[in-house]
Image (spheres, rainbow, N blue to C red):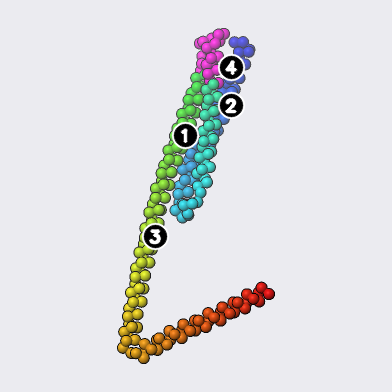
């Protein structure tokens, strides 16, 4: 095997190993992101039950953006590794290289197996992430519907209780007014006394209002001078 062709093969192997190492690290981080999304979504669900519906879910949105970015990066690395493997396959079948070179074919097959494993792991993790995200979004929608129904029920209960309270108070006032009218009709002197009390209250109110008005005018005049 010529030195030039040997160096070319070694360069391809070096590129393949470097890409495989990068993919290994990326896939580990990608898997952790998927697991972390499930845990953080559960915490967000518990937080939502004790907070306003207007609280933004920043954590979930941030992880979604990170997921898209990492997926693109991994797809690019897989494409580059596929290209290197194709070049290695071309090299093993090119002129001047023995077609039955067991060592080269074994090395090529090992890199192909690694590429296949990484591709399978990536698609599996990506599918799991999407499934978890869809499930969490569905659960979040269900929780909002439940909270909305609970709020409506509470509002109706408060309205009914207020209505019953107002009805009860109205009945009490009518009863008191009826008793006062009955008492006034039976005892004219009491009726006259009530009327005088009401007249005096109105007079006192007018006097008090006039005093307040005069004092206000005097204060304004003093303030502007």
Residue 62 visible from this viewpoint: yes
Across and down, in percent, residue 69 comes to 54, 35
Neighbour class for label 4 at 10 Å: few (<14), some, many (≥20)? Answer: some
Which disc, if any, is residue 182?
none
Q: Which residue is mark 4?
A: 9
Q: Earlier in the sequence, mark 4 or mark 2?
A: 4
Label 3 – label 1 distance at C-alpha = 43 Å
* The magenta stretch spans residue 100: yes
Which disc, if any, is residue 18?
2
Neighbour class for label 1 at 10 Å: few (<14), some, many (≥20)? Answer: some
Tell me the residue at 48%/39% (across/down): 34
In the rendered view, tell whether residue 14 sits above or below residue 181.
above
Which disc, if any, is residue 126?
1
Q: Earlier in the sequence, mark 2 or mark 1?
A: 2
Q: Nearer the viewer, residue 145 or 91?
A: 145
Q: Earlier in the sequence, mark 3 or mark 2?
A: 2
Label 3 – label 4 distance at C-alpha = 75 Å
Mark toward the viewer: 2 or 1: 1
Tell me the residue at 38%/66% (across/down): 162
- Farthest residue to the top: give it: 96
Mark toward the viewer: 3 or 2: 3
Q: Quadrant of residue 211?
A: bottom right
Q: Are marks 4 and 1 in contact (CB under 8 Å)?
A: no
Mark toward the viewer: 4 or 1: 1
Quadrant where the image shows the N terminus: top right
Q: Which residue is mark 3?
A: 155
Label 2 – label 1 distance at C-alpha = 23 Å
Q: Earlier in the sequence, mark 3 or mark 1?
A: 1
What is the chief secondary structure element of the magenta stretch?
helix
- Farthest residue to the right: give it: 225
In the rendered view, tell whether residue 53 sits above or below residue 216.
above
């Amino acid at each position: 095997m010529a030195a030039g062709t040997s160096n070319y093969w070694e360069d391809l192997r070096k590129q393949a190993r470097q890409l495989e190492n990068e993919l290994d690290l990326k896939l580990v981080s990608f898997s952790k992101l998927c697991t972390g999304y499930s845990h953080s979504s559960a915490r967000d669900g518990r937080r939502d039950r004790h907070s306003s519906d207007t609280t933004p879910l920043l954590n979930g949105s941030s992880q979604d953006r990170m997921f898209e970015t990492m997926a693109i990066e991994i797809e690019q690395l897989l494409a580059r590794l596929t290209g290197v493997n194709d070049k290695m396959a071309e090299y093993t079948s090119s002129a001047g290289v023995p077609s039955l070179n067991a060592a080269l074919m074994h090395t090529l097959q090992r890199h192909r197996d690694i590429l296949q494993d990484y591709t399978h792991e990536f698609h599996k993790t990506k599918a799991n992430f999407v499934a978890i995200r869809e499930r969490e979004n569905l659960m979040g929608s269900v929780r909002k519907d439940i909270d909305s129904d609970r709020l409506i029920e509470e509002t109706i209960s408060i309205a009914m209780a207020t209505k019953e309270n107002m009805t009860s108070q109205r009945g009490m006032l009518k009863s008191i007014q009826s008793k006062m009218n009955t008492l006034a009709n039976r005892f004219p002197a009491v009726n006259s006394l009530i009327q005088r009390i009401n007249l005096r209250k109105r007079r006192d109110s007018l006097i008090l209002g006039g005093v307040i008005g005069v004092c206000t005018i005097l204060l304004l005049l003093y303030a502007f001078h």
